[in-house]
Amino acid sequence: AQSVSQHNHHVILSEAASLELGCNYSYGGTVNLFWYVQYPGQHLQLLLKYFSGDPLVKGIKGFEAEFIKSKFSFNLRKPSVQWSDTAEYFCAVKRSNFGNEKLTFGTGTRLTIIP
Amino acid sequence: DSGVTQTPKHLITATGQRVTLRCSPRSGDLSVYWYQQSLDQGLQFLIQYYNGEERAKGNILERFSAQQFPDLHSELNLSSLELGDSALYFCASSVDHEQFFGPGTRLTVL
């Protein structure tokens, strides 16, 4: 079974700082990878996804992630964070051979941006 | 707005009771997934239905059950509720590789 690790549980940054949130997964086969964001009191929203091709994926709101197959990693980055990025961020993985397949989520990283 | 709707938004009930959570997927999506989000367990997959049939089971307790109806809406039934069942229950739907999440139902068991 696949699993996802997010080692940063709570990250606190000042506005305009650069962000990198770690995500590592364990699964021997081909995977689809996702980053979701959950703003306070809201549902999960997709930030970006990787299926195949260019390992550098750009998402909404200036976020990007890089898939490094050799490291089983899919880290989320943003060059300059804003106060409105305060939220919880979840990395998720799905086996890519199956179109309709459950997501396995990491434990989430709480991001707090200080104005 | 993801197009996935869930009712009710909040539910407060007592231990031992039974509740039903409802989910309507996006138009055309055949798959419905249920997830539980709690402070101690994080986001856990419970169960998946595809076009009315159970497709996959995750960490779903025997006290919980679900079904998907011909109009593709789904219900999650939670019975003999315990304090530890207090959580946010999300439904998601997908037609292929991407899942869209509903706003969730916050269940509080007192």
Image (cartoon, rainbow, N blue to C red):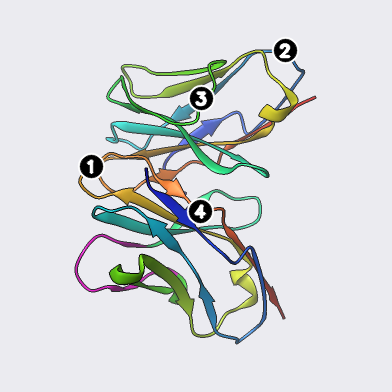
Q: Return the mark for residue A98.
A: 1
Count up the numbered dots.
Answer: 4
Badge nearest the viewer, 1 or 3: 1
Of labels 4 and 3, the one closer to you: 4
What residue is pinned by disc 2?
B16
Q: Is mark 1 on a helix, strand or loop?
A: loop
* Tag 4 residue: A106
On the image, the x and y values in percent for residue A44 come to: 51, 51
Mark 1 Cα shell of 10 Å, populated few (<14), some (14-19), many (≥20): few
* Residue that protrudes farthest toward the right in the picture: B110
**Residues indicated by labels 1 and 2 sit on the same polypeptide chain:** no
Q: How crowded is mark 4: few (under 14 residues within 10 Å), some or many (20 or more)?
A: many
The residue labelled by disc 3 is B22
Q: Which span is picked out in magenta?
A: A49-60
The kind of residue tagged 1 is Phe
Q: Is residue B62 above or below residue A83?
A: above
**Chain for disc number 1:** A
Say few, some or many: other residues with alpha carbon within 10 Å of mark 3 (under 14 / 14 to 19 / 20 or more).
Answer: many
Q: Which residue corresponds to the image point at 44% horizontal and 77% vertical from the top-left?
A: A62
Q: What residue type is labelled 3?
A: Arg
For the point 71% across and 21% down, the residue is B82
Structural distance between the alpha carbons of marks 4 and 3: 26 Å
Which SS class for mark 3?
A: strand
CB atoms of marks 2 and 3 within 8 Å: no
Q: Is mark 4 on a helix, strand or loop?
A: loop
